[in-house]
Image (cartoon, rainbow, N blue to C red):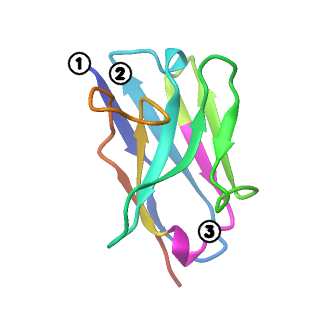
Amino acid sequence: QVQLVESGGGLVQPGGSLRLSCAASGFSLANYDIGWFRQAPGKEREGVSCINSSDGSIYYADFVKGRFTFSRDNAKNTVYLQMNGLTPEDTAVYYCASDCVPMEDDYWGQGTQVTVSS
């Protein structure tokens, strides 16, 4: 069964850090472009970061550059999003998906809630 499962979300104070994980089963992450996305209440989903499977290049949205780091562990079939310097504006449900521009037949995780609040 093909599945993506995110974990690592939670409540953190402004300036804090979290590391999100996205574990895959049923397929190899190494063969796919993998994207991180987020959706805040009342807002549309937006792309956060994405890794290119061909050359390993990583894209970051401007609003996370210098704060978030995307990494991949092929042996664990898992990707990570290290998030530092979190602000209340980062509060959202974070998702991983099996493409940088997901289409109908791509896979999505169930999401993990990140709340940044004092």
Point 68% across, 67% down: residue? 85
Image spot of residue 87 (x, y percent): 60, 74
Instruction: Identify the residue position indicated by label 3 in the image.
Output: 86
Q: Is there CB contact under 8 Å for labels 1 and 2?
A: yes
Image spot of residue 14 (x, y percent): 61, 77
Image spot of residue 101 (x, y percent): 45, 36
Q: Quick one: SS at disc 1?
A: loop
CA gap, disc 2 and disc 3: 29 Å
Image spot of residue 28 (x, y percent): 45, 15
Q: Residues within 10 Å of mark 3 (few under 14, many from 20)?
A: many
Q: Is residue 85 magenta?
A: yes
In the image, what residue type sits under mark 3? Leu
Looking at marks 2 and 3 on the same chain, the residue that comes earlier in the sequence is marked by 2
Is residue 43 depicted above or below 6 in this figure? Answer: below
Is residue 36 depicted above or below 44 in this figure? Answer: above
> In the rendered image, is residue 114 in sight?
no
In the image, what residue type sits under mark 1? Gln
Q: Is there CB contact under 8 Å for labels 2 and 3?
A: no
Q: Which mark is residue 1?
A: 1
Is residue 29 depicted above or below 112 in this figure? Answer: above
> In the rendered image, is residue 67 in sight?
yes
Q: Which mark is residue 25?
A: 2
Point 28% across, 26% down: residue? 105
CA gap, disc 1 and disc 3: 34 Å
Q: Is residue 68 magenta?
A: no
Q: Residues within 10 Å of mark 2 (few under 14, many from 20)?
A: few
User: Relative to residue 65, is residue 100 drawn left or right?
Assistant: left
User: Relative to residue 115, is residue 60 drawn left or right?
Assistant: right
**Residue 39 found in image quarter:** bottom left
Q: State which region is magenta.
A: 80-90
